Amino acid sequence: MSIGSPSNVTQAATREIAGPLLELTDVKTHFRTARGLVRAVDGVSFTLERGKALGIVGESGSGKTILSRSIMGLLPTKGTERHGSIKFAGAEIGNKTRKQMRGIWGKEMAMIFQDPMTSLNPLMKIGDQIAEPLKIHLGMSKDDAMATARRLLQDVRIPEPDRRLQQYPHEMSGGMRQRVMIAIAMACGPTALFADEPTTALDVTVQAQILDVIAEQRRDRNMSLVLVTHDLGVVAGHTDEIAVMYGGKLVEKAPTRRLFAAMKMPYTEGLLASIPKLEQVSHTRLNVIPGRPPDLVNPPKGCRFAPRCPYVSHKCLEEEPPLTVTPDDPAHSYACWYPVGSPEYHEAKARIATSAEAN
Amino acid sequence: MTDVMTPDPTTTIDDQVDARFKKVRRRRIPRFGVLFGMTFLIVLIALTVLADYLPFIRSPETGVKVNGRLQSNYKLGPGYVAWWGTDGNGKDVFAKCIYYARYTLFIGIASTAIGLVVGGALGMLAGYFRGKTDRVISILVDCLLAIPALVLAIMLVSRLDDIKAEIPFLGWMTRLWQIILTLSILAVAPLARIVRAQTMALREREFVLAARSMGAGNSRIIFREILPNLVPTMVTVAATGLGILIAAEGALAFIGVGIDTSWGFMINANRARLEKAWWATVFPCLMLFLTVLSFNLIGDNLSRRFDVREAAV
């Protein structure tokens, strides 16, 4: 068997049903706290086709992790309010209980977590941790499960899989452990994989390898991927579509290429501008988006990004912009009154330039 | 990991470094305290188990005789014939100390085991499910902790006799089992408390969430993910707790509500003659002291090793 081919061929057979795999309509996740209702996710809608990769981008506190956990149904039930509809392969899962979700977890949806140093059980051998879901969900015998675990380790490009199966998590590096996490998530052949900042805790050199492994597995298994990250560089090469989140809302969504070429939201522009560039002289001041993410208990009136937006005008502070589709590309939508490229945007930009010169 | 001097060509440099570190760590001599504790306990347990077969340990029931005459009334002091002297009935104090260790150790281990199972289960339930379960268990545990341990123990032991007389199927409940039951009730509260705290911390760990995201149910998470990670804490608390329970057993015997075959009972029986025959009191005291000390030293070392903070014990 060649490295990288799916470990379980039968799993791919069920993937050919038409219709989007994931369909979110006005999903809201609110937490009741002492300070009031925290609107962590506030009306997010999108669809994800089978086999496609969606990147969810946003800074800390924008609700991207909560959104992915809401879809998985992994949030604590106490003090959480969930609204809206989440359809998975045509079936509503937004209102399912934990017990009902257990049949979906692992087999249909799986998740990779941010910190591989803490997401493996420190007292269980790697092999046992991969084999356990195989034995329980797929009813494999111990030997079959171990053989599959070995193949999974090969799939995620871990050298000497036989030795690794017998090792404990502390005997491995962060990159290795994240590969093991991917192998565990892959074990039962899920149709959708959620990766919650899978590379944030890793070395830059290892990041690319991990992303490649995820991309490879996605292609081989015809699996959908939701990649949650704050790093636009991470999503750029590995997703078909990007959704930008801000203050619990979706503010822009576009095919990856288009988002980078023709972004509409000033927030997206700010995110992109904040990435340091290679051609810059060293010690160039890094670009930042001034201010902080909005308070999700009392979100600002109007556009949530308005208080931090350099091009803000009166209307932005008063009325909330709806998510609108661009006229030239139906896949591209944004929530902004005066998007990048509009006459008002250029006007504001010119104003900023002159005031900067005046100083 | 094979020999460091001839590295296996398939192992990487990292592995060799790992192996070297492991060797260094293993070579470190354990602290004096834990070495002493382990040695004392191993020797004590060996003597206790083999007491029937060892020629130098007399039966505690037959008196020591010299030239056919019973050495009663504390006649023999520590010496060649009876190492730790004889007591008021002419019995060998050393033999008694060794034989009685059987009861003491059995009581300590049995009640710790019961305490571990019950306290561990309560603590895990409370810490894992939180909410109402936690509230009920916590109130129970707090109540148990609030009552002075010795008062509770005396009360329980004296009541258990009456209960035993009334309920027919409790015939197996000899004084020994009454003590075990009482002490295990004392052991439950602190164990439940510390296990609860640990479980609360563990259930928020990412590997538990990861297991849940793979479809693991509550029982699987509790037994496969949380329980194994609780073992270091439980072992540590149990080791220290064993010392405390053994001391408590001695205390119960001393005040006369415990069993007669106990160091505490010996101390009480002979303390009136402490000035004339110090050996009959001092040696049981010494045994009790060293046993409790050994368990504490081991417990301390374990808690340092596993980084367990003992809030409750």
Image: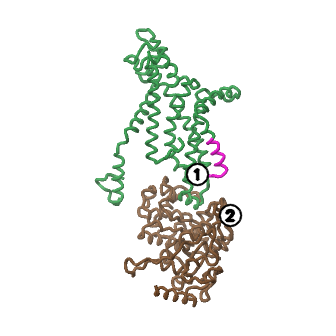
Chain colours: A brown, B green
Residue B93: which disc? Answer: none
- Residue A284: percent from the left, percent from the top? 40, 78
Residue B10 visible? The answer is no
Task: Report which quarter residue A163 is drawn in.
Answer: bottom left
Q: Quadrant of residue A43?
A: bottom right
Tell me if residue A194 is in the magenta stretch: no
Mark 2: few/some/many CA within 10 Å (<14, 14-19, 20+): few
Q: Nearer the viewer, residue B71 or A345?
A: A345
Chain ID of residue with mark 2: A
> Is A20 placed above or below A124 here?
below
Q: Is residue A267 left or right of residue B7?
A: right
Judging by the rendered image, the residue that carries numbered circle 1 is B222
**Where does the image place residue A356, in percent across and percent down from the top left?**
47, 85
Q: Up-down: is B131 above or below A347?
A: above
Badges 2 and 1, same chain: no
* Frontmost residue, B231 versus A259: A259
Say if residue B235 shows up in the picture: yes
Q: Residue at x 39, y 35 (%)?
A: B36
Dominant secondary structure of the residues highlighted in magenta in the image: helix
Amino acid type, residue under disc 1 in the picture: Ile
Q: Are marks 2 and 1 in contact (CB under 8 Å)?
A: no
Left or right of residue B7, residue A171 in this image? right
Q: Position of residue A178 (x, y in %)?
A: 47, 64
Badge 2 amino acid = Lys
Secondary structure under the numbered disc 1 in the rendered image:
helix
Disc 1 sits on a residue from what chain? B
Given residues A98 and B312, the one toward you in this image is: B312
Q: Residue at x 65, y 79 (%)?
A: A320
Mark 2 to mark 1 CA distance (whole Å): 22 Å
Which span of residues is magenta-colored? B127-142
- SS at mark 2? loop
Q: What residue is disc 2 on?
A: A96
